[in-house]
Structures are given as C-alpha cells and as structure tokens.
Amino acid sequence: MYDLKPILKPVHVELPTCMYPMKPVIQHGASSGAVATPSSTEDLPEIQALAVKQEKILKQLAELREQLVSMRTDLKLCNKPAQPSAIQSAPSKTSKSKSDTKKIEPINASYLQDFVVNASPENIPYGLLALKKLWIDRLNLQVECFTHSTIPKLSEEAINFQNQITSFEPKRENLPRIMVTLIWKNVGTYTEMITSPTAYVPICGEVNILRFLSRCGPSEFNYERNDDVTEADSILDTCYQLINKQNVTDKKQVLKTLSSKLGKTASFGGDEVSLCDIAATSAIKQVQKALAKDINPNMAKLIGRVSAVVGI
C-alpha cells in the first residue's frame, strides 16, 4: 500500500493520574499502512482467557434458549381447551354469594372525621338514617340536628326523621364514631356536606355524600369493591339527576331510566341492601309527591323492602 502523509501533527497529551493505567492491547505498526499486531507475548494469555469466557457465556445462552423453547412447547400442550365433559364435571367456584367474598376489615380511624350536612326539610337525606342503621354493629354515625334561621318551621316528616336519627343509638360500646351535625337549611335539592369549615369546599348532593361515607365506612359496605362498580356509579348518577332535575317532565324521564336499570329484579344489590338501593329509595321518597303515579310496582316493592330493612 502507498504511504500517506499524516493529516494531524502529533500532539502531546498529559494523561490524568487519577485512573488505573492499562497496558495497550494492540499496537500499530511503524508505518501508517502496517497491520496491527499484538503488543507483546504477555498480552496473549489475557486475550485467550477472555475468549474462553466468551465461549462459555455463549454456550450457557444456547442452553438457556433450548430450555425456553422446551418450556414454551410444554405450556402449549397444557393450555389446550378442556373437554366439555370435564368442564361440566368440574366444581363451580362462582356459586359463592357476594357476602362470602366481601372481607370484613378493621375501620381506619384516620379516615373518620366530623362533618356538617346542610339539608332542606323538603329534601330529607334518608340515606344518612339508612347508613346509621345498616352500620349499627360496625360504626356509630352519631347525628345532632339544628335548624337554621332560613327555616321558619319544620315539616312533620322532617321532625319524624330527626327523632329517628337522633334517638337510635348502637348497643355496642367503643365503636368507631363519626359525628354528623345536620342543619336544616334552605339549600333546595342540593344537600351539601362540609368536612372543613375553614376551606368550605362542600360535597354537593346526597348521592355524593353516600359515596364519601361508603369509602370511609365499613369495608364490607363499600360499593367500589364489587365487580359491577361501573353500573353502580351509573345508577347513583341517575339517582342524583332524579333529585336535582327541576322540571317534572325531566324527572319522569329520569325515573323511567332508573326503573329500566332495575328491570324485574328485586333490588339493585341482590339479596343484600346496597348503596344503590338506599340512594334510589331516598331519591324516590323525595320526589314521590310529584311522581307518585309514575312509580311502577317493582320499584314500589324495592322501596318497601329497603324501608323495612333500614327503617326509612
């Protein structure tokens, strides 16, 4: 090969002394066209040892690949669909009721905090009374009632509700407790819950209050632990609309939607009273004066069943 003049002039570089020195593995020939040769015979054993290690690693990788291929083949054989007769004879694991799958866990006291509920006597939050009776052996939902100056006189229905929710106390002592201050106030259909008086960021709507209490109350009553949580949220949203729609025609349409969700079943929660059953019963009781003729028989049965169980 022909020689070329060096493009760059040799530059002297001061090497740092803070690193370990290393012998050069290869050394260039005297001329620019020379072939690289080993620097010395002392470096050859190190290169050979490195080559041996490389061959060992490649061999181990090949063995590992063979094992993975064998495992994949075995898994394909094991994942073949079972015969129909085997499926029919296998014991059913889904026959357990929802109550068997719900785990009863200790209540986290850090989630429990006192709060204020502002409610109109025309839109009584029956859900609070239902939860108080439903949680009687797990959590003491203690309620005190006051009347705001915007309410000149309580209705008889509101007085009966107030007497029930304040006189009904759990028999067990030392239960976790939430102190609720219920203030009868002219807030219309938008029942509000205030957890921080200084910040005053209310949770609006009885349905949303029930959602909040469901999360911090006994775990076995938390609707979000069920498999059908999306459908449950849809039902709760429909209950919220039923209360807060101002036009009677709109209320009738929402009630029709809620009735179609119930269908011909006895309740939204199956054998047990669920949060959806409580929210639907409370919502319908608040609008029944205007929509009494539109409540179908199956929905009336649901209201009667829930009222008998939780006493609302």
Image (cartoon, grey):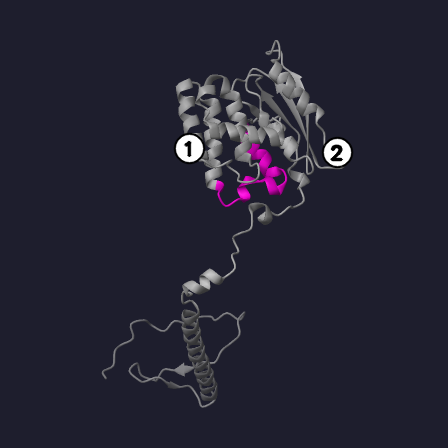
Tell me the chief SS of the magenta region: helix
Residue 205 visible in the current orientation: no
Q: Nearer the viewer, mark 1 or mark 2?
A: 1
Which residue is under mark 1?
Answer: 260
Q: Which residue is painted at 66% across and 18% down in the image?
A: 146
**Residue 247, position as x, y percentages in the image:** 41, 18
What is the distance, in whole Å, between disc 1 and disc 2 at their CAs? 39 Å
**Residue 25, position as x, y percentages in the image:** 43, 81
- Element type where label 2 sits in the image: loop
**Residue 87, position as x, y percentages in the image:** 45, 61
Residue 94 visible in the current orientation: yes
Give the magenta-colored segment's residue range.
206-229
Would residue 297 be found to the left or right of residue 202 on screen? left
Q: Residues within 10 Å of mark 2 (few under 14, many from 20)?
A: few
Whether 39 is among the magenta residues is: no
Q: Which residue is painted at 60% across and 11% down in the image?
A: 151
Whether 213 is among the magenta residues is: yes
Q: Nearer the viewer, residue 214 or 273?
A: 273
Q: Nearer the viewer, residue 45 or 20?
A: 45
Which residue is under mark 2?
Answer: 171
Residue lying at the far right of the rendered structure: 173
Q: Which residue is painted at 55% across and 35% down in the image?
A: 275
Mark 1 residue type: Ser
